[in-house]
Amino acid sequence: MSPDSPKSHTKFKQKYQLPYTLIADEDHAIAEAYGVWGEKMNYGRKYMGVLRTTYIVDPEGRIARVFEKVKPENHGEEVIEALNVLSKA
């Protein structure tokens, strides 16, 4: 989910051959509801944006794990490890 447009999501999905639906949250209502729309800083400039966060949702629809301040590098492996641990619980 990101505030990018549906058209942008379609291009991203095709480029990376993603097998799942991407959610366009252009008005950032979902991000605000989850508390992940907030102030960011880049090169000394403050602005509002998505605070990178990953949620693992269990089969009953409950949030089982939250990863805050996500860095894309190696995050996939971190999520897979967490899924493996949760599946054994």
Image (spheres, rainbow, N blue to C red):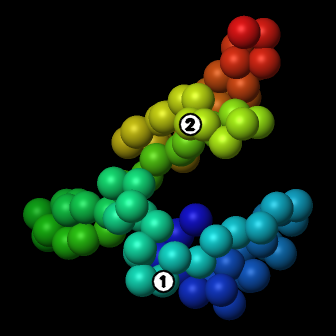
Answer yes or no: is residue 70 visible.
yes
Asked which secondary structure carries label 1, the reply is loop
Q: Residues within 10 Å of mark 1 (few under 14, many from 20)?
A: some
Looking at numbered disc 1 in the image, what kind of residue is underneath it?
A: Glu
Looking at numbered disc 2 in the image, what kind of residue is underneath it?
A: Ile
Is residue 53 left or right of 14 when viewed as pictured?
left
Is residue 36 left or right of 47 when viewed as pictured?
right
Seen at 49% across and 34% down, the residue is 66
Q: Which residue is mark 1?
A: 26
Q: Which residue is mark 2?
A: 63
Q: Residues within 10 Å of mark 2 (few under 14, many from 20)?
A: few
Do the residues under discs 1 and 2 have CB atoms within 8 angstroms?
no
**Residue 20 place in picture, x, y as percent:** 82, 62
Indicate whether 40 appears above or below 82.
Answer: below
Residue 65 location, quadrant: top right
Q: Which mark is residue 75?
A: none
Indicate whether 21 appears above or below 75.
Answer: below
Task: Mark 1 or mark 2: name the one nearer the start of the chain.
Answer: 1
Marks 1 and 2 sit apart, C-alpha to C-alpha, by 23 Å
Seen at 78% across and 18% down, the residue is 87
Q: Which one is nearer the viewer's eye here, 62 or 11?
A: 62
Asked which secondary structure carries label 2, the reply is strand
Is residue 5 left or right of 32 when viewed as pictured?
right
Seen at 46% across and 47% down, the residue is 53
Image mark count: 2
